Image: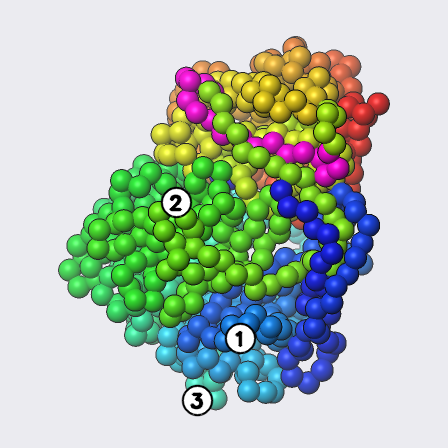
Amino acid sequence: MNLRLLTLGAALVTSQALAAGAAAGPATAAAPVVAAATARGFTVEDMVGMERVGSPVLSPDGSRMVYTVRAAELDKNRGHTEIWMLDLRDKAGKALPQRLTQSEANDSDPEWSPAGDAIYFLSGRSGSSQVWRLPLGGGEASRVTDLPLDVDNFRLSPKGDRLALSLAVFRDCADLACTKGRLDERAKNKATGRIYDQMFVRHWDTWADGRRSVLYSARLDASGIVSTAPVSLSGTLDGDVPSKPYGDHDEYHFSPDGNTIVFSARVAGKAESWSTNFDVYQVPAAGGEAPRNLTADNPAWDTRAIYAPDGRTLAYLAMTRAGFEADRFHVVLMDVASGKKRTLADGWDRSVADFIWAPDGKSLLASADDMGQHKLFSIAVADGKVTPLSGNGWINGYDMQGKTLVVSHSSLSSGAQLFRLDPASAKPGQPGQQNQLTHLNEAALAGVHFGEYEQFSFAGANGDTVYGYVMKPWNAKPGAKYPVAFLVHGGPQGSFGNEWGYRWNPQTYAGAGYASVFIDFHGSTGYGQAFTDSISGDWGGKPLEDLKKGLEAAAKKFPWLDRERSCALGASYGGYMMNWIQGNWPDGFKCIVNHDGVFDTRGMYYASEEIWFTEWENGGPYYKVPEKHEKFNPANFVSRWKTPMLIVQGELDFRIPTTQGLGAFTALQRQGVDSKLLVFPDENHWVLKPANSILWHHTVTDWLDHYLKQ
């Protein structure tokens, strides 16, 4: 479910901000200039207005990279995405980024042609989401697909002669036109009722409308467009490809020769909402055969299969325990000819988030949470030896071609930037050298001083070593004490680590004059699977003990923390913990902020959508083991509630439904506890729209100011 130091003075103007306007051919950024600004703290307006860089995608020869940049359009209350390119052949680092696309619609998901002479991408510039092709030798982008339905995601075959693409269709329709016609008829129908006979009735933020995401194969004709109807590859399976709500084209891949496609799908029928049994399937790229299940022997999660460069080995991620979404993802290697499988680096106690093959096929590059960081590792195929390639901070994306490795890297003091990373320079205890390639936001943030931060550890529940971070206000002075924002992460199998976020960012509190403390309590990821497992069935036990001991340890170690002036804040599981703190740590804080938090575990079980989560975390269905669900139910302790609380709820949050927030607000109001409710009718489990994000942050900061600064 996953409910999962530096100061900037004079800075270079971001090249993207100085890009030339619309013109024939790609736009080229102007030369950077020096800007000076008065020192100030970081604000939510700064954060919302930041350009956000996407993952790098390298050309086949590794000489160039393309990437997306999302810019805020505050007047339209949205973000807008375009595609940029940077030439990496200039060793002096003076090459300037070029903007490749410019349209009113978003342009995203870039892929290189096999020859490196064109970029394929998704765009809604024709009125629907279709695949487009931009020749790099000059000329305008042309549409590759002109289908009656939106293309949700795609991949180009290694030969450049075929697309794999995903479309949402009604499975009983014979063609795409049938789905389009049925949707048009529904739009005309004045009756709005829906009828269901199985779950999911709704998922994440969307009510089911009967369509499924189906993987198709489309041949490119001699002119380079799709001129014939795509062929369904996964239509015989009752599962979404890619998965919902987060799945993308990383869940399907071509073989190196382009003749085969592997993809991941969950085929569970009416058990879908309580099953995590995803399997890897293989199918001819041209279709004509039913998909073949390659992982039927494993009842747990199998996904993200990728062929080795020589096509002889298939690597994929697998969990072991069915029904558990936060089990350790380990790497399995399968010999394509024989089907024989072996686990790679099984003794490495980390859960792999994603991976790619190194170009020589001798190792995998994999990212994983690790001790409050999210690092990139190399895993040798021969013996499973694991070597860290990156150091502290958060690797958000990466790609490698030839000897060129580029990563997207962020930290608690910097939004993501792209870097060239030298894997050959990595040594035991020493990460590879990184050279910065992009400089987004440096002009906009000139003069912004970020809060200094530090990781610390303490003896938590069971005497186990637990880690956390503290951050100072941006203008902290020696000898002064500062009010504390005590941040609790969601998941609960997640981490508040050394990363940059756009929803819960400690630097927004540092900019508002607050110190912050955040703890990776029992259940957090990156500290071994046993530590992650320890929260299941114990939501209000060891995690609460860790939070208490962690805040106490931080206050003793860092005298600039004013423990007597502190507020607790959290969302999702963090919001659950706010409700739990109300009844079980009632004198801990001056105020509380609860965003989309679980209030009543019984109501949560019967109204949430992914019920495998609530069943695993509480030892089974509510109707079978109600006592386990009730053991840590915040609703059972409302008579103890007395701390002023701000509650935030998104009405499109189907994971933790609106009634959970309303229940907590009712409990507070009925007892006369100072409380406030902020509801977003158009937000889901997250607050995504720029104007809503600004309102959210100011409402939260005002709440803290009222109780901690007056």
Estimate the spatial distance between the alpha carbons at disc 3 and disc 2, rounded to whole Å.
Answer: 53 Å
Q: Nearer the viewer, residue 710 or 14?
A: 14
**Residue shown at 64% from the left, 34% from the top:** 471
Magenta residue span: 460-476
- Residue 459 visible: yes
Estimate the spatial distance between the alpha carbons at disc 2 and disc 1, rounded to whole Å.
Answer: 30 Å
Question: Counting other residues with Cα less than 10 Å from the Cα at mark 3, is it few (<14), some (14-19), or many (20 or more)?
Answer: few
- Residue 611 visible: no
Find numbered disc 1 in the image and state the secondary structure of the residue it sits on. Answer: loop
The residue sitting at the front extreme is 478
**Residue shown at 64% from the left, 80% from the top:** 26
**Residue shown at 37% from the left, 79% from the top:** 159
Q: Nearer the viewer, residue 702 or 540?
A: 702
In this picture, is 609 found above or below 463?
below
Question: Counting other residues with Cα less than 10 Å from the Cα at mark 2, is it few (<14), some (14-19), or many (20 or more)?
Answer: few
In this picture, is 328 found above or below 619?
below
What residue did someone put label 3 on?
222
Q: Nearer the viewer, residue 118 or 235?
A: 118
Task: Quarter of the image for the C terminus: give it.
Answer: top right
Say which amino acid is labelled 3. Answer: Ala
Estimate the spatial distance between the alpha carbons at disc 1 and disc 3, rounded to whole Å.
Answer: 35 Å
What residue did someone put label 1 on?
90
Q: Residue 606 placed where, x, y %? A: 52, 30
What residue did someone put label 2 on?
429
**Residue shown at 49% from the left, 27% from the top:** 457
Say which amino acid is labelled 1. Answer: Asp
Say which amino acid is labelled 2. Answer: Gly
Q: Nearer the viewer, residue 319 or 384?
A: 384
Q: How many marks?
A: 3
Question: Counting other residues with Cα less than 10 Å from the Cα at mark 1, is it few (<14), some (14-19), or many (20 or more)?
Answer: few
Q: Earlier in the sequence, mark 2 or mark 1?
A: 1
